[in-house]
């Protein structure tokens, strides 16, 4: 079984066809998916999805690319973190592609999430775009190694990946790895230690080949897995087992929830 470690199933185009999306997951042997929070008004909807469907888990966070987004506080994140279906904090991080100028607000938002994750004992889901040096700096300054986490949809170079690995973070590979011109992502995907590798779709975005340019969904993480397995010279089954084990090791609260669900009649 595979796990999609990062998706946005609450977004309108996916939630409107959720039964079909979940069926495609099943058909592609994708057993679980992590639904990622990016805005405070969506937290309740995301958690409700995870409550309704045992194959789904939730995180809470405010995306870094919107300066006008409703801010959250460490206390608010900690309150949501107590919910049994919330297994991580984020999506959080830095984005210098969409945001420029005085970005102190973005740095403070990131610090708030790191502190909440450390206090809650939950992993971080980190977004970094054209900002990896500052992302790593703030992770170090806020002692994010204490909680760990994942560098989601990783597109940076191997040196940056090594720096994140040194902090105890995992590296997540998206459908970009299937794109013809994604040499840097392919290089990282082939070199990350197998025990620190995660897979994701970031759906509804970044659909892998052969669906590039179309709407993505969690079931398509299988195509990401096939490409990464080929790059590493291992079987799809071996990669699926390793990456799924990694997901549940990092998101230990999800592992407990999954075990409880299996024990139900």
Image (spheres, rainbow, N blue to C red):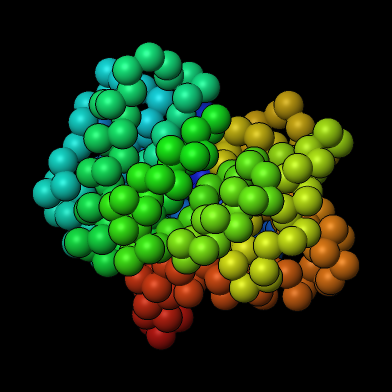
At 37% from the left and 50% from the top, the residue drawn is 139
Image quarter of the N terminus: bottom right
Indicate the position of residue 223 as horizontal and vertical percent values: 76, 51
Q: Is residue 108 or residue 64 the one in the foreground?
A: 108
**Left or right position of 243 against 133:** right
For the C terminus, give its image quadrant: bottom left
Q: Nearer the viewer, residue 147 or 71?
A: 147
Of 172 and 204, the residue lying toward us:
172
Q: Nearer the viewer, residue 234 or 129?
A: 129
Q: Tell me the quarter of the picture where residue 146 sits.
A: bottom left
Q: Position of residue 77 (x, y in %)?
A: 20, 49
Q: Is residue 129 above or below residue 34?
A: above
Horizontal and vertical percent position of residue 30: 63, 61
* Identity of the residue drawn at 42% across and 16% down: 100
Q: Position of residue 104 (x, y in %)?
A: 28, 26
Q: Is residue 10 visible?
A: no
- The answer to whether residue 75 of the structure is visible from this angle is yes
Question: Which residue lies at the image location 27% right of the left edge and 18% below the top edge?
Answer: 68
Q: Is residue 207 left or right of residue 16?
A: right
Residue that sits furthest to the top in the current view = 101
In the picture shown, does residue 253 fall above or below 157? below
Q: What residue sits 68% from the left and 62% below the top?
A: 192
Relative horizontal placement of residue 180, taking residue 124 as reference (left or right):
right
In the displayed structure, 39 sits above or below 246; it is above
């Amino acid at each position: 079984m595979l796990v999609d470690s990062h998706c946005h199933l609450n977004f309108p185009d996916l939630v409107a066809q959720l039964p079909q999306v979940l069926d495609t997951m099943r058909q592609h042997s994708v057993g679980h998916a992590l639904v990622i929070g990016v805005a405070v008004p969506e937290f309740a909807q995301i958690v409700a999805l995870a409550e309704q469907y045992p194959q789904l888990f939730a995180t809470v966070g405010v995306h870094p690319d919107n300066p006008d987004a409703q801010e959250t506080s460490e206390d608010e994140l900690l309150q949501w973190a107590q919910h049994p279906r919330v297994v991580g904090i984020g999506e959080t991080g830095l984005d210098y592609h969409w945001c420029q100028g005085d970005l102190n607000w973005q740095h403070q938002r990131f610090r708030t999430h790191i502190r909440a994750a450390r206090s809650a004992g939950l992993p971080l889901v980190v977004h970094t775009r054209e900002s990896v040096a500052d992302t790593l700096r703030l992770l170090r300054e806020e002692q994010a190694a204490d909680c760990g986490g994942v560098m989601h949809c990783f597109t940076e170079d191997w040196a940056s990946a090594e720096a994140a690995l040194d902090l105890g973070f995992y590296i997540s590979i998206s459908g970009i790895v299937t794109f013809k011109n994604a040499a840097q992502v392919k290089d990282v995907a082939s070199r990350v230690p197998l025990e620190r590798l995660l897979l994701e779709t970031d759906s509804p975005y970044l659909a892998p080949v052969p669906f590039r340019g179309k709407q993505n969904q969690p079931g398509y993480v299988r195509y990401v897995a096939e490409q990464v397995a080929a790059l590493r010279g291992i079987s799809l089954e071996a990669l699926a087992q390793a990456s799924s084990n990694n997901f549940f090791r990092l998101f230990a609260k999800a592992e407990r929830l999954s075990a409880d669900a299996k024990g139900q009649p």
